[in-house]
Image (cartoon, grey):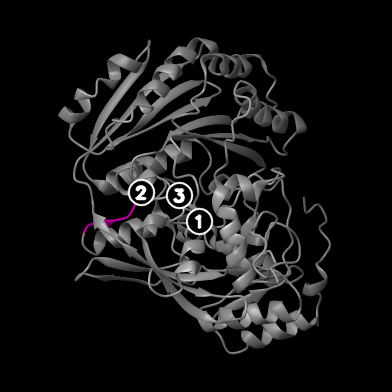
Amino acid sequence: MGQTQSLPPASQAGSPLQLCLNNVFASSSGDVAYPQSVFYQLANVKAYNQHIPVVPAAVTRPTTSQEISKIVQCAVASNVKVQARSGGHSYGNYGLGGEDNAVVVDMVNFQKFSMDTSNWQATVGAGTLLADVTTRMHDAGGRAIAHGTCPQVGIGGHATIGGLGPISRQWGSALDHILEVEIVLANGTITRASATQNPEILFAVKGAAASFGVVTEFVFLTRPEPTNVIRYSYTLEFGKKANMANTFATWQSIVADPNLDRKLATEVVLFELGMIISGTYFGTKAEYDALNFEKRLAQNATVSVNTLDNWLGAVGNWAETEALKLVGGVSGSFYSKSLTFRPDTLIPMKGIQDFFNYLDNTDKGTLIWFAIFDVEGGAVNDVPQNATAYAHRDALFYLQTYAVGLGSLSTKTIDFVTGMSKKITDSMPGVDFGAYAGYVDPQLTDGQQQYWGTNLPRLQQIKAAIDPKDVFHNPQSVRPVA
């Protein structure tokens, strides 16, 4: 997994790649840095997951689409792979290539923003972080799109993988708000893709863009910000995890109700000190109270229900929760896996009990670990399976298991994370779970199938048509087929 730290051949001083890239930036306000240069250190190019060391051939920071086109052409001429980097939060460091010797296109300078108030469509640069997306849309007329909870994540990766978040049950995912993109292709062409222009490219962008090009900007359909927001939590602290299994089973039965109010977002977070069931309700306190969550879930729990002033307050509250989970903007050595659950693949009681007993009885090798069950469904599932590359249109909830190494990541901790998933999958033989590409797992041997499912053959055909030499590549990207 990229263990060598020697300099990639293409990044050697005086190499054809270096000469080509230096020429691109000779009269540009952008820049390029190579691993052996002081500028590379000053640029603070850091792998998000430090368990997977990656040495790029070059890290470029272009300022225009034309410069990206030239960068891609330089890489092709030197037979070097290319990957875009927006916020840099790939669990496999795929924004740095995921393996040595890639050219990185860092989108930090692509901060364009405008709002067309005649149709409330927003144009957003692909380097924009989610925190800035939120504030810029708010300032431009109180508008919003669905997106995740970590403010430091970049929209370029987030909206082209899935972009799931608390309001997705009402509005769909972030990628469901994409109307149009500008993208640089493997032959250097700068083009646009929409429902009427290059629709196959738009299909691929909505779930698998890293395999097909560098998206430079989005046109999003926006919505009025929600006006009523409730934040709630039920905390079960200390004690054995096994004693919490029945509460989780109750949560699963609630979210499995096909008539569950789409205004409700909810997740279960298990960690060293206990279990928290929390979320957001996009409605009034009276409407929330009518759901009767407290009486159904609170089992000797600490209950907190707060009315938030507005959408910005809700997004800020989500950010605080992410900080508590230690999966925000701080890099470290960690491992994560994910499983997808559908209405017809709920976890049986034996699987629930085995899972919670495992948490009690296993040496984890770390105190920093999480198991997060996050409800989806609703509007995300309204979109047909074959409408976008994102494949999990039948998902009811996801499980993300995650552990951080203390200094380094031990085999014991990796085995603990793997074991959390295994306890559940062993109780459900024959089930095809699938995994979410936003929680990329480099150890999956069939990652492409797990991420894109039945959409993979179509993606492979599109790849063969527009990137037959596999220029846009990471260890689990879509491969072209003949």
Residue 466 horizontal/vertical position (percent)? 60, 73
Q: Which residues are magenta?
A: 142-146
Residue 104 visible within the image: yes
Q: Nearer the viewer, mark 2 or mark 1?
A: 1
Reading the image, the residue beneath label 1 is 389
Look at the numbered disc 1 and give the secondary structure of its residue: loop
Of residue 420 and residue 426, the one placed in the foreground of this image is 426
Sequence-wise first label, 2 or 3: 2
Residue 148 horizontal/vertical position (percent)? 42, 47
Reading the image, the residue beneath label 3 is 385
Residue under the image location 28 percent in, 14 percent down: 295
Look at the numbered disc 3 and give the secondary structure of its residue: loop
Reading the image, the residue beneath label 2 is 172
Q: Nearer the viewer, mark 2 or mark 3?
A: 3
Residue 259 horizontal/vertical position (percent)? 28, 30
Q: Which amino acid lies under the numbered mark 1 shown in the image of this protein? A: Ala
> Does the magenta-highlighted stretch encompass residue 203?
no
Q: Residue furthest left?
A: 286
Of residue 409 and residue 455, the one placed in the foreground of this image is 455
Q: Is residue 192 above or below residue 124?
A: below
Q: Which amino acid lies under the numbered mark 3 shown in the image of this protein? A: Gln
- Main secondary structure along the magenta-highlighted residues: loop
Residue 64 visible within the image: no
